[in-house]
């Protein structure tokens, strides 16, 4: 029998998949939120179907699952955000 997940259930499942692969809780939550938002907007190619790919990237060390992005103001109206080899989503959130 097939069951449709709510967006909250999908976000929770995606968060758990990323955390199980070695992503920090904070980063897993941020990434899952971004993937579910895209999924909800109908952009399935960049939604939760990416979670297994990102999990493999963390497990292989290609993405630092515990990376904490850093921000630096480089000019009065410019910043530089370094993702520290982690996911883009936490760095984007920090930059915003």
Image: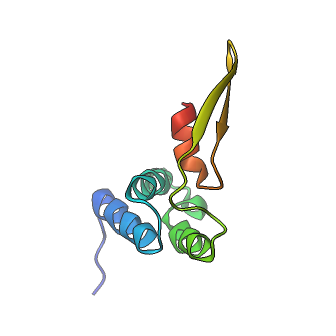
Quadrant of the image for the C terminus?
Answer: top right
In the displayed structure, does residue 80 sit left or right of residue 7? right
- Asked which quadrant contains residue 44, the reply is bottom right
Residue 86 percent coordinates (x, y): 60, 55
Q: Residue furthest right?
A: 75
Classify 62 as above or below 3. Answer: above
In the displayed structure, does residue 8 sit left or right of residue 65? left
Classify 72 as above or below 49. Answer: above
- Asked which quadrant contains residue 12, the reply is bottom left
Residue 8 or residue 29, whichever sits in front? 29
Residue 16 percent coordinates (x, y): 36, 69
Quadrant of the image for the N terminus?
Answer: bottom left
Seen at 59% across and 61% down, the residue is 64
Seen at 64% across and 50% down, the residue is 84
Residue 52 or residue 79, whichever sits in front? 79
Q: Residue furthest top?
A: 76
Residue 44 or residue 19, whichever sits in front? 19
Seen at 57% across and 32% down, the residue is 95
């Amino acid at each position: 029998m097939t069951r449709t997940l709510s967006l909250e259930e999908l976000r929770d499942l995606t968060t758990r998949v990323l955390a199980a692969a070695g992503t920090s809780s904070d980063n897993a939550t941020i990434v899952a939120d971004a993937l579910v938002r895209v999924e909800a907007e109908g952009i399935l190619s960049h939604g939760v179907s990416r979670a297994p790919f990102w999990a493999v990237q963390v497990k292989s060390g290609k993405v630092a699952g515990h990376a904490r992005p850093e921000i630096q103001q480089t000019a009065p109206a410019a910043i530089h955000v370094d993702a520290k080899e982690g996911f883009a989503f936490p760095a984007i959130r920090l930059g915003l």
